[in-house]
Image (spheres, helix red, strand yellow):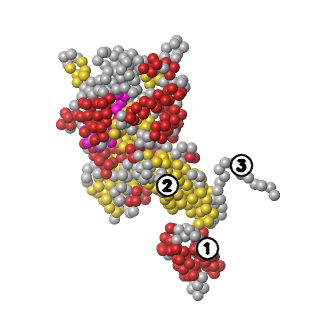
């Protein structure tokens, strides 16, 4: 007899199990999760013929405990099975999909069809008796279940009772619950095993704020026309306001010594004066490099005190990791081989033609791989030793991806709490792959997605296509980016962008000055005039607050909503709904009671007028099933204004962007 073998490494099982999610490139990398996140699990499960099948999720936690979740079927004809499960422990989860022939359901269905037309009635009862008797004898079955199956078998075998009446005994709610809890299985098939890297909550959900410590407390002497830099001590005074607005992470641009060679002046000019502080990203001088602190900011002791003060205020500090060097960086002298030498013998500076960055030398990661890799690891560990657990990485897409996979792997193996945010505005393949190889979060294209259609498309992509490997952080602005929407949208435009980012994204961020509606662009550029990257920019926060020229109260409110409602801090639960207006964006977020830290199910409906210039009146149309609302009429309360309404599937809204550009509705009761 000829032996029949299988030629491929992963043959299909007795039952087909395909398209298992969450997974990244069929399990090449772990999927992403964070403590408290609710993940949708799914698979395509099928078999030959018409017999019933079922599927379960086997989820093993980092500490080895196993939970089993019965999966439910998806749309008819798709062979898809789904279930949601919440991650509760930090570390590596493992999971498999277990498919099996649902023998009881196959028998019940066949019996009901045949008995309805008077075919094989006693034969179907006998087959039911045999099935239940075998199942009751299984060693793995509980005593209570076994006794119930034996009793049902006796009922099915009672020939004095009509077959249709005996069948009803097998279709009671009690039997349904019994069989659901302990199914009668055969042809058990397991999928491949997949991993989920579950990280701490801030890795997946947080509100970020950015300021330059040198500007906080900076003083200009009009008589001498000289500046005195802000310091960590003076910047500490700003921490309370950042915390009061509800931000959890404060990101600092590079705090290292800045080179003088080719130092950039105001508005990125090449004629820096003696009082111009230069770009913090031109790292390195005679005072040190990536492991040093700019003398103007203070000492290492001052920095540690600043980090501790932030922690006391409920804020974590994120440091910039910009792997580049000024011409005066100690690396240039000690390791010139780490850079690219041009044909004329000069070291190549950074360029993005036609842009030139003469004050920065890029590192060539293909020269002295071990030397460069180990030095960067040393630098990162240096800052970890000073209390830093979050790094915002500048331009990671200009460095080799395999370097990041190595670095993040090395760091997280020893320090699993460390978070890396990728500042990568580049092509999709690179951005997605940076997420796959380990970056916990990434900047996104959200900054340039402003219309309703653009936002709907992009939010759906983030929530339902790439969430297994790509965690979005929706920044509304940066020191480098001031979009036309903000330039011309005024206060309304700033409010709208903050609401959408904070309500749609599990993580969002803003750069200081956004709350003051700083929106004047440098002519011909998509960035602020008199950019803080090249000069001191102290702000009179108190005067702005007294004059009412700040949207800080709104920022505070939306961060309070995020803190109070865990549904908002999720991503994969975002569902888009409909409106009759081309500028009214509608989405909902739902969290089941068993997944909520409050112990109660919650649904929030967000309706935003994304046109900062016009009042919009329209009807919004809600799919209550997708929104998780168990009814078509319900009460809602607007968390932005406190007003309450009676809503249903179809609702009239009027949103004036200057007064109230959005509703954030909490469903408070279903009628």
Residue 462 position in % (x across, y down): 46, 44
Residue 17 seen by the camera: yes
Q: Which of the two residues, 68 or 533, is positioned nearer the viewer here?
A: 68
- Height in image: 48 above or below 271? below
Residue 496 in which image quadrant: top left
Secondary structure beneath label 2 = loop
391 lies left or right of 190: left
Q: Looking at the image, tell me whether mark 3 or mark 2 is earlier in sequence order.
A: 3
- Using the rendered view, name the quadrant where residue 499 is placed: top left
Of labels 3 and 1, the one closer to you: 1
Instruction: Let me know if residue 176 appears in the view.
Output: no
Nearest to the eye among marks 1 and 2: give it.
2
Closest to the observer: 102 or 323? Answer: 323
Where is 647 relative to 655, above or below?
below
Which residue matches tag 1? 134
**Residue placed most toward the observer, 49 or 8:** 8
Q: Residue 311, labelled with which disc?
A: none
Q: Residue at x 60, y 69 (%)?
A: 103
Q: Which mark lies nearer to you, 3 or 2?
A: 2
Q: Which mark is residue 64?
A: 2
Q: Residue extending furthest top? A: 344
In contact (CB < 8 Å): disc 1 and disc 2: no
In the rendering, at what x and y percent does residue 115 appear? Answer: 60, 78
Q: Which residues are magenta?
A: 241-256
- Residue at disc 1, secondary structure: helix
Q: Does residue 250 belong to the magenta stretch?
A: yes
In the rendered structure, find residue 7 and report the number of the disc placed on it: 3
Q: Is residue 505 left or right of residue 226?
A: right
> Where's the N terminus, which quadrant?
bottom right
> Percent position (x, y) of residue 202?
38, 44
Give me the C-alpha separation between circle 3 and circle 2.
34 Å
> Judging from the image, what secondary structure is the residue with disc 3 in?
loop
């Amino acid at each position: 007899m000829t032996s029949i073998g299988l030629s491929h490494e992963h043959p299909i099982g007795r039952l087909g199990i395909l398209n298992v999610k969450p997974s990244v490139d069929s399990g090449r990398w772990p999927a992403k999760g964070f403590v408290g996140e609710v993940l949708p699990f799914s698979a395509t499960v099928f078999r030959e013929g018409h017999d019933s099948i079922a599927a379960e999720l086997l989820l093993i936690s980092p500490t080895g405990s196993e939970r089993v979740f019965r999966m439910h079927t998806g749309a008819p004809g798709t062979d898809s099975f789904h279930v949601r499960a919440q991650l509760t422990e930090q570390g590596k989860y493992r999971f498999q999909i277990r498919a099996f022939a649902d023998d009881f359901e196959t028998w019940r269905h066949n019996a009901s069809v045949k008995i309805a037309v008077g075919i094989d009635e006693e034969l179907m009862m006998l087959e039911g008796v045999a099935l239940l008797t075998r199942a009751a004898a299984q060693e793995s079955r509980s005593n209570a279940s076994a006794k119930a199956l034996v009793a049902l078998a006796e009922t099915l075998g009672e020939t004095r009772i009509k077959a249709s009446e005996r069948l009803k005994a097998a279709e009671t709610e009690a039997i349904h619950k019994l069989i659901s809890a302990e199914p009668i299985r055969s042809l058990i098939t397991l999928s491949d095993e997949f991993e989920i890297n579950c990280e701490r909550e801030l890795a997946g959900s947080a509100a970020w704020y950015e300021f330059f410590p040198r500007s906080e407390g900076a003083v200009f002497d009009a008589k001498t026309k000289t500046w005195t830099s802000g310091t960590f001590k003076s910047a500490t005074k700003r921490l309370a306001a950042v915390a009061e607005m509800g931000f959890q992470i404060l990101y600092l641009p590079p705090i290292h010594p800045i080179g003088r060679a080719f130092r950039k002046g105001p508005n990125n000019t090449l004629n820096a004066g003696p009082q111009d502080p230069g770009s913090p990203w031109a790292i390195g001088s005679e005072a040190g490099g990536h492991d040093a602190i700019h003398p103007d900011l203070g000492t290492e002791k001052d920095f540690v005190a600043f980090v501790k003060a932030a922690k006391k205020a409920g804020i974590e500090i994120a440091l910039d990791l910009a792997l580049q060097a000024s011409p005066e960086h100690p690396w240039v002298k000690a390791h010139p081989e780490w850079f690219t030498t041009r044909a004329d013998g000069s070291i190549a500076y950074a360029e993005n033609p036609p842009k030139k960055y003469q004050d920065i030398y890029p590192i060539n990661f293909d020269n002295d791989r071990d030397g460069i890799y180990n030095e960067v690891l040393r630098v990162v560990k240096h800052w970890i030793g000073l209390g830093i657990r979050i790094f915002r990485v500048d331009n990671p897409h200009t460095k080799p991806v395999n370097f990041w996979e190595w670095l993040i792997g090395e760091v997280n193996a020893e320090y699993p709490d460390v978070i890396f945010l990728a500042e990568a505005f580049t092509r999709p393949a690179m951005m997605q792959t940076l997420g796959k190889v380990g970056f916990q979060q990434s900047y996104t294209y959200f900054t340039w997605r402003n219309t309703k259609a653009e936002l709907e498309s992009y939010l759906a992509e983030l929530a339902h296509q790439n969430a297994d490997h790509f965690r979005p952080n929706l920044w509304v602005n940066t020191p480098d980016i001031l979009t036309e929407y903000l330039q011309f949208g005024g206060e309304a435009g700033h409010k709208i962008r903050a609401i959408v980012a904070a309500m749609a994204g599990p993580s969002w961020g803003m750069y200081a000055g956004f709350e003051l509606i700083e929106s004047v662009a440098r002519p011909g550029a998509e960035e602020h005039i008199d950019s803080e990257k090249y000069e001191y920019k102290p702000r009179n926060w108190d005067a702005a607050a007294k004059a009412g020229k700040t949207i800080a109260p709104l920022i505070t409110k939306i961060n309070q909503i995020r803190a109070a409602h865990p549904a908002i801090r999720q991503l994969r639960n975002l569902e888009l709904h409909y409106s009759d207006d081309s500028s009214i964006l509608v989405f909902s977020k739902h969290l089941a009671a068993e997944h909520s830290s409050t112990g109660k199910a919650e649904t929030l409906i967000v309706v935003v007028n994304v046109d900062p210039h016009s009042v919009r009146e329209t009807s919004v149309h809600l799919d209550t099933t997708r929104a998780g609302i168990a009814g078509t009429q319900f009460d809602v309360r607007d968390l932005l204004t406190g007003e309450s309404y009676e809503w249903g599937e179809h609702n009239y809204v009027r949103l004036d962007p200057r007064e109230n550009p959005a509703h954030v509705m909490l469903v408070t009761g279903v009628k």
